[in-house]
Amino acid sequence: MPVRQILELFRRGADYKPLPTFQAELNHQCKIIAAPAFLVGLLSWLPYIELDINLYPQLTLLPYLRVGLTIVGALCLGLYLIPFFRKKSYQLLLFFVIYLESATALILGLVTADPAYMGGFSFLIIIIPILPFQKKHSLSILGTSGIIFLAVGIPLHMNFKSWYQLYGGYNLIAALAVSLLAVFLLDNIRKQCYENHCAVHKVNEELQETFEELRNINEVLGKTSLELSGKNEELRNANEIKSELLGIAAHDLRNPLQVIIGNTGLLLEKMKDDPAAFKKLNMINKSSDKILKLITNLLETSSIDNGQLTMKATPLDVGQLAEIVVKDMRHVAEKKGQTIILTFQKGCVVTGDKMMLQQVMENLISNAVKFSPIEKTIWVTVEYDERSRDNSAARGGSIITFSVRDEGPGLTREDRSKLYGKFQRLSAKPTGGETSTGLGLSIIKGLVILHGGAIRVDSEPGKGSVFSVDLPVSREEGTA
């Protein structure tokens, strides 16, 4: 049973829970080895009685010491079987070893250090450090044994020279040196192992607690994820219904608004002689036009977000398209005394939707006109760009860049962070009383991405802005 416990102790390793104190740990180890030690003490010394009688018949005390050790071993074994004393295994084993060493030292003193007995005494001295005793107890046992040995041997005229020459002295000195060294080393090793084991066990417990907490959190997150999944599905359905209703409402509003805009435009021609009526009709016309633009932007944004917008891709010359757009936008710029300068390279062909790219150009130029001061210049350029850029348009090789540069107020860092968001109001204000829905740049970005391109801006407060759209070169153009 004790051997199996020892093997189990080694097998369990880190699973073994260390006891609260080092002394309790030593007591536990003594409990494991105590029973075998008591059995050895009970049986091992009896055969030597006959040897003692033959060698030293005049020393009748020797057999009694042998029998005494057997009695002590039997007594300790009996006490070990009682639960109360088993808990005190450290004290039981210490008492047994003290008697063993004392009796052995006394026997050696009585036989005046007979070399035949010195080997066993040296062996016992070497075993002392192996026993799970505290350092002070191990040293006390060794010291007490030596004192008894000398105290008994000297008065009996021990022949030190004789047994020393017969190697008994060498054995004893070597055993003492090894034992003393082992006492200090093994005591430190036991303490270090115990402390390390406690630290590892503490970390294991903390990790186990953390693992348990993480498992609970994971369960909560799993339930929350399921709930969020359900909510997301509900929101997705609600968003689809909202988009559908918005599309229906916006589509149904466009026709009446176009009728209002058309009729008020005709009435404006006839009411030029009536300033009051002309002013009110003009207000109705502009307000209706503003609402129509907002509805158109909302429909486009909804189509882009839902992936319902499809391109009619054809080869397009970006320079020629920009020339058409600039020609149409010049009259708007001229109302504010602004000048639009267009420069473009020939043969800048991309594959794209003409209406969508035209809308991108109109929006960028319209924004430049809207936010630039009166009598300023706007530069529009179309050119090949062979430089490698960190965007999707550059991954296929050469790109064509359409850019619009103005002399407006520029963009702050906060403006740049929300530039392409929906319904975003920037710090810059239109310089001619124009209105803005806050959807233009969001729509532009969506249309550019749909063409596999990218939009970027270079701007500083007070130094104007440059909006650039990079589009991949048409495959036909690139292979021509």
Image: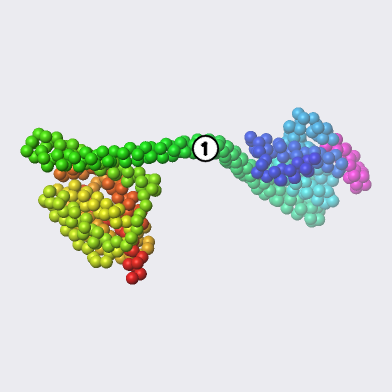
Which residue in the structure is indicated by mark 1? Answer: 226
**Which amino acid, by three-letter code, is at mark 1?**
Leu
Left or right of residue 87, residue 367 in this image? left
Q: Point out the stretch of residues depicted in magenta.
A: 46-73
Looking at the picture, how far across and down is residue 474, in whole percent?
34, 64
Front in this rendered view, residue 177 or 430: 430
Looking at the picture, how far across and down is residue 120, in whole percent?
81, 48
- Magenta-colored stretch includes residue 52: yes
Q: What residue is shown at x 43% (from left), y 39% (from top)?
A: 236
Q: What residue is shown at x 33% (from left), y 58% (from top)?
A: 352
Q: Secondary structure at mark 1?
A: helix
Looking at the picture, how far across and down is residue 344, in whole percent?
22, 63
Looking at the picture, how far across and down is residue 318, in whole percent?
27, 61
Front in this rendered view, residue 434 or 25: 434
Left or right of residue 440, residue 84 in this image? right
Q: Which quadrant would residue 282 be assigned to in this image?
A: top left
- 133 is higher (above) or lower (below) than 473: above
For label 1, count other residues whose C-alpha is less than 10 Å away and answer few (under 14), some (14-19) or many (20+): few
Residue farthest toward the left in the current orientation of the protein: 273
Left or right of residue 265, residue 77 in this image? right
Q: What residue is shown at x 31% (from left), y 48% (from top)?
A: 443
In the rendered image, which quarter contains the N terminus?
top right
Front in this rendered view, residue 225 or 102: 225
Chief secondary structure of the magenta span? helix
